[in-house]
């Protein structure tokens, strides 16, 4: 009996060792990289308490296994799992957090950037470009019911996290009619949009199209593709994610997206290096790598890094009042268009308004005529749920009772900007999970408070 028990114990130990070597250990550096960068951005970009970052942004398994250490003097964060697989992230002024991988830390820090002055103060300008709210609100809204719906979107004070909402804002007929935040956050707090950044990249491409700098129907000039079939990929294919490149978007395993985000200094270079798997234009495949190719194309089109870093601020953010927004770059200095844009709830609402109003913001034309219609046209093969870096309601069962003309800016862990033109409505919900949050019911409740 004792011999059998010893044998069982040794089998269990062997199984644990095999599991650690084959499965857990190769994933540990990705876990620590996620945690290091997440904590670095949380503390130095979003100005949040580390305890809150751990409790919210880094709270899910297996990321929660990583332990982080903050150096406030050098503005860096290191993370480990069981004391091993160390990864370090550093903060650079104007460019946010970046992982220290193959590029020397001194070189990464040297790329700090001073954001351009917007030339105005939001405290002195009316909404939507500024933060001065009108003395009166739109007529016909049931404000008591709306406030109750917003209140119920949050966990109660001192309650165990369940709904996990951090901030919400409701804009009707271009006016903010309701907003609420989990303490101590407010209308100035930056939240991580994750894949909401893809729609920001869509807007950057749109600005260049309006300026006549690029043609979406033409293949981009990518030397690495010039001698093979990838040279047939057009900008339109990239925008619609029908480029045909091999790319697996699985955040919970070792995949192209996790290797790109957490093991690569050059995400554009990583993404363009993937082989062609399908004929361009024939298969839709959701891919963060495709978006980072678009970001690299923006950089190559502008040609000058100083102008490139200023570009999203001068040509997009500052023109629509997004003054509480920061876009992070990778180690090579390319904006991580797939994943790393941080903005306040109001700023995400402003971005939604830009698309609600077909690329015109408070009288300022930002995007070319027809760009929003193009961006919200269903891509063949996407089952009607995707346009050009923007998600759609059409044929999408996630929100069965919401008007079909709704489209949305969608991010990991429950970040959402819903745009419903037929209701003149933009709804923003920022949080750190949607597992226990009924978004369809939330939206239906808000719609029920509107006139008509």
Image (tube, grey):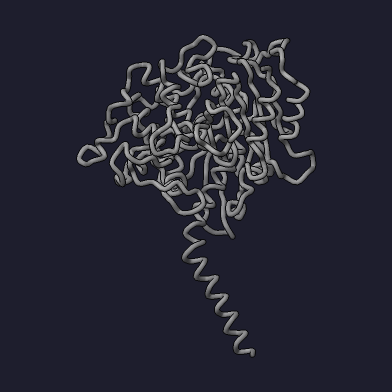
Q: Is residue 335 above or below residue 307?
A: below
Q: Is residue 395 visible?
A: yes
Q: Position of residue 197 (x, y in %)?
A: 49, 32
Q: Position of residue 394 (x, y in %)?
A: 50, 32
Residue in the image at 46% along x and 65% along y: 22
- In this view, the residue in front, 222 or 91, is 222
Is residue 365 toward the left or the right of residue 229 in the image? right
Q: Position of residue 387 (x, y in %)?
A: 44, 31
Give the quarter of the image for residue 168: top right
- In this view, the residue in front, 7 or 76, is 7
Give the quarter of the image for residue 70: top right
- In this view, the residue in front, 200 or 175, is 175
Q: Position of residue 435 (x, y in %)?
A: 64, 45
Tally of numbered discs: 0
Is residue 178 toward the left or the right of residue 313 in the image? right
Q: Is residue 92 visible?
A: no
Residue in the image at 61% along x and 15% along y: 174
Which residue extends farthest left?
227
For the C terminus, give its image quadrant. Answer: top right
For the N terminus, give its image quadrant. Answer: bottom right
Q: Is residue 122 above or below residue 335?
A: above
Give the quarter of the image for residue 370: top left
Residue in the image at 44% along x and 22% along y: 373
Residue in the image at 49% along x and 11% along y: 364
- In this view, the residue in front, 425 or 326, is 425
């Amino acid at each position: 009996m004792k011999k059998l028990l010893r044998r069982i114990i040794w089998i269990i130990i062997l199984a644990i060792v095999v599991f650690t070597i084959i499965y857990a250990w190769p994933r540990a550096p990705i876990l620590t990289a996620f945690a290091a960068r997440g904590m670095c951005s949380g503390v130095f970009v979003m100005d949040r308490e580390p305890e809150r970052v751990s409790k919210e942004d880094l709270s899910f398994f297996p990321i929660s296994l990583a332990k982080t250490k903050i150096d406030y003097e050098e503005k860096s964060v290191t993370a480990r799992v069981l004391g091993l697989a160390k990864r370090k992230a550093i903060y650079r002024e104007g460019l946010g957090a970046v992982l220290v991988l193959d590029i020397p830390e001194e070189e990464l820090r040297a790329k700090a950037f001073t954001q351009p002055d917007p030339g105005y103060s939001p405290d002195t300008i009316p909404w939507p470009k500024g933060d001065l709210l009108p003395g009166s609100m739109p007529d016909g809204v049931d404000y008591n019911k709306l406030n109750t719906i917003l209140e119920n979107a949050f966990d109660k004070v001192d309650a165990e996290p369940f709904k996990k909402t951090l901030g919400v804002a409701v804009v009707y007929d271009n006016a903010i009619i309701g907003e609420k935040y989990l303490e101590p956050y407010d209308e100035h707090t930056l939240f991580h949009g994750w894949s909401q950044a893809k729609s920001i990249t869509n807007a950057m491409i749109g600005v260049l199209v309006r300026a006549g700098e690029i043609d979406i129907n033409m293949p981009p000039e990518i030397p690495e593709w010039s001698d093979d079939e990838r040279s047939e990929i057009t900008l339109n294919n990239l925008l619609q994610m029908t480029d045909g490149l091999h790319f697996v978007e699985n955040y919970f395993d070792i995949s192209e997206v996790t290797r790109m985000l957490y093991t690569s200094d050059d995400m554009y270079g990583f993404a363009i290096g993937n082989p062609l798997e399908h004929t361009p234009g024939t298969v839709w495949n959701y891919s963060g790598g495709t978006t980072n190719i678009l970001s690299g194309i923006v950089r190559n089109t502008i040609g000058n890094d100083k102008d490139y870093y200023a570009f999203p601020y001068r040509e997009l953010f500052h023109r629509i009042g997004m003054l509480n927004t920061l876009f992070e770059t990778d180690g090579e200095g390319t904006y991580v268009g797939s994943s790393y844009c941080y903005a306040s709830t109001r700023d995400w609402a402003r971005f939604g308004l830009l698309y609600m109003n077909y690329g015109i913001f408070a009288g300022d034309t930002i995007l070319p005529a027809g760009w929003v219609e193009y961006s919200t046209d269903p891509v063949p093969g996407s089952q009607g749920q995707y346009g050009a870096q923007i998600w759609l309601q059409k044929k999408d069962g996630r929100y069965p009772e919401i008007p079909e003309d709704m489209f949305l800016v969608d991010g990991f862990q429950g970040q959402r900007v819903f745009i419903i033109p037929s209701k003149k409505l933009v709804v923003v919900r920022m949080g750190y999970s949607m597992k226990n949050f009924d978004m369809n019911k939330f939206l239906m409740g808000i719609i029920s408070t509107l006139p008509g």
